[in-house]
Image (spheres, helix red, strand yellow):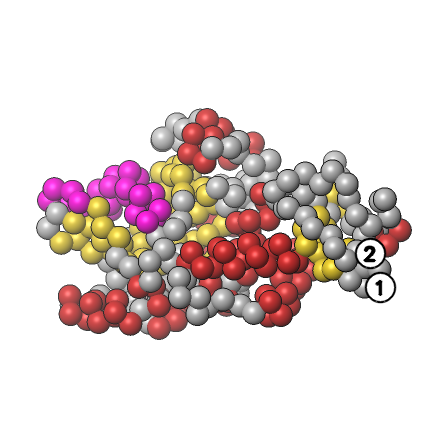
Amino acid sequence: MVVSIRKRRLVFRAEADLEDYLQVHLSPHLSLLGLNLLIIGRQVETIAGGLIDLLAIDVAGVIYIVELKLDQASPSITAQLLAYRRSMKRVTRQQLIGVVAGGGLQIDLLKAFQRRFGHPLPEIVNTSQVLVVIATSIPPRTAESLLDLREEGYLVSAFHYVVQADELSLIPCNLEAQDVEPHTATKRRERRARSTFSRPNRLPGYRVRIDVKWFWLTHAHHFVSFLVTFRSVYKLYTQWARTQTPDGLDLLSAGVFARQLAALTAASGEWTRVFLPPGTTIDPYEPLADPPSVRLRRDAAHWISAYQRNTVDRHGDLQRDHADERTVA
């Protein structure tokens, strides 16, 4: 998909000009690709002394670090992004509010977030950071560096932009297919035709079929219930994935999804896999008025797979619930 917004005689003579434009238009561009962001900072100074071109946040409180290049992106951009991420991942919710208020855009994050997304800023934000590159071209060596970051578990998206007279287009880069460097208009059209990102509403920069982590990060923080059944989570996943891939080709089977989700939650420690009595139904977005009995191990009376949110003590340490010992009538 190519996202376009009309504007008279677009000319970017310096990187600051590109920042001016994308500060206003980046969110509309990405919203047409299914990614809803609020721009909250520009030239944001990090504790290491660097300056983040654009800073954004999504509905789940995930932070987006956007690096712009007027020309091509060199391989050194990966070190630059990692330095920014190291600084940003230490920022608490209260610090983020202060950074945004004291930055060049002087945004009241609490009010701006409420206006944009229709609900308050989550109490837990900045649990993960997405690294975004926007450049006129991304050479193969740079693409390999970005892919290395992905393989290490970082969330990375990349776009190249094209300006033709009065129109700017953002084209998501399929790094795996090396769809990275626009040489001619003909080659661009050919790549777009075969690109996996040519489908409408496809989220940029990754394949839905392998990215359970992205789905979980953008949904789990909104669960009101401290218990969610696997069945309800998988149903949400299939609904979400179909909005990204209308033909459904990238949907994970329930078994593969279950294995990946189990590994993801075990690694984070924020949720514990448990088992509930048969017939248990839970709406993740509604408070659980009558909690069922819960077991850490499957038995004859508990075999519905589910996930239980672990509590956090006043020191910020996760406390696992001893589900085997607790039965609520």
Query: Residue 288 falls in which quadrant of the image?
Result: top right
**Circle nearer the viewer, 1 or 2:** 1
Query: Is 30 included in the stretch rendered in magenta?
Result: yes
Secondary element under disc 1, as helix, strand or loop, is: loop
Horizontal arrangement in the rendering, residue 171 relative to residue 167 (left or right): right
Q: Residues within 10 Å of mark 1 (few under 14, many from 20)?
A: few
**Label at residue 239:** none
Give the quarter of the figure containing the C terminus: top right
Horizontal arrangement in the rendering, residue 61 relative to residue 319 (left or right): left
Q: Is residue 167 above or below residue 91?
A: below
Give the quarter of the figure containing the N terminus: bottom left
Q: Amino acid at mark 1?
A: Asp
Q: Residues within 10 Å of mark 2 (few under 14, many from 20)?
A: many
Q: Would you say the magenta stretch is mainly helix, strand or loop?
A: helix
Horizontal arrangement in the rendering, residue 111 relative to residue 311 (left or right): left
The residue under the point 82% across, 50% down is 293
Q: Amino acid at mark 2?
A: Arg
Label 2 sits on residue: 295
Q: Is residue 113 above or below residue 146?
A: above
From the top left corner, tell me how far across and down residue 308 is, in percent: 72, 50
**Label at residue 299:** 1
Magenta stretch bounds: 6-32
The residue under the point 56% across, 36% down is 122
Of all residues shown, which one is farthest toward the right?
A: 325
Given residues 220 and 100, the one toward you in this image is 220
Q: Are marks 1 and 2 in contact (CB under 8 Å)?
A: yes
From the top left corner, tell me how far across and down residue 53 is, in percent: 35, 44
From the top left corner, tell me how far across and down residue 126 is, in percent: 54, 44
Q: CA distance from mark 1 to mark 2?
A: 8 Å
